[in-house]
């Protein structure tokens, strides 16, 4: 049973409780990581991105360009750092480029 929030609760507290009770954080993180990828990588990379999926702490990115995939392999640590900074917390630990 969930705890009852009093009338003095802030909107943030209420939303946090709803997210926790309904186990929505994974879906919210998935959407947030997709948006961060699109924002940080720009149109050049996004044109060759065919799929983005977050499973646990691993981001799976499907690319249509082998050359771009190879180029991004060298910057995985930077990609992880940029996305985590954009989201304000440590969500990603690994990036898999396909």
Image: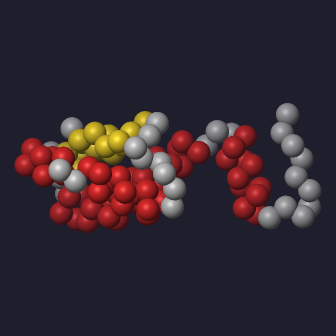
Q: Nearer the viewer, residue 95 or 33?
A: 95
- In the displayed structure, 7 sits above or below 50; it is below
Q: How is the image coloured?
A: secondary structure
Q: Measuring from the top left, give residue 67's x and y in whole percent.
A: 7, 49
Q: Measuring from the top left, give residue 26's x and y in whole percent.
A: 54, 42
Q: Measuring from the top left, give residue 35's x and y in whole percent.
A: 40, 58
- In the displayed structure, 46 sits above or below 51; it is below
Q: Nearer the viewer, residue 17 or 93?
A: 93
Residue beneath the point at 67% across and 47% down: 19
Residue beneath the point at 22% across and 53% down: 75
Is 3 displayed left or right of 91 in the figure? right
Quadrant of the snapshot with the N terminus: top right
Residue beneath the point at 32% across and 64% down: 40
Q: Measuring from the top left, give residue 85's x and y in whole percent.
A: 44, 62
Q: Residue furthest top?
A: 1
Is 75 displayed left or right of 10 in the figure? left
**Res. 26 in view:** yes
Residue beneath the point at 87% across and 43% down: 3
Looking at the rendered structure, the number of numbered marks drawn on it comes to 0
- Which quadrant holds residue 22? top right
**Res. 65 in view:** no
Quadrant of the snapshot with the C terminus: top left
């Amino acid at each position: 049973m969930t705890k009852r929030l009093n009338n003095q609760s802030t909107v943030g507290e209420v939303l946090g409780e709803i997210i926790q009770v309904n186990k929505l954080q994974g879906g919210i993180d998935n959407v947030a990581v997709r948006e961060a990828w699109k924002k940080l990588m720009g149109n050049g990379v996004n044109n060759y991105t065919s799929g983005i999926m977050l499973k646990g702490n691993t981001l799976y990115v499907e690319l249509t360009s082998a050359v771009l995939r190879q180029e991004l392999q060298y910057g995985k640590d930077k990609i992880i750092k940029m996305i985590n900074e954009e989201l304000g917390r440590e969500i990603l630990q690994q990036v898999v480029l396909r």
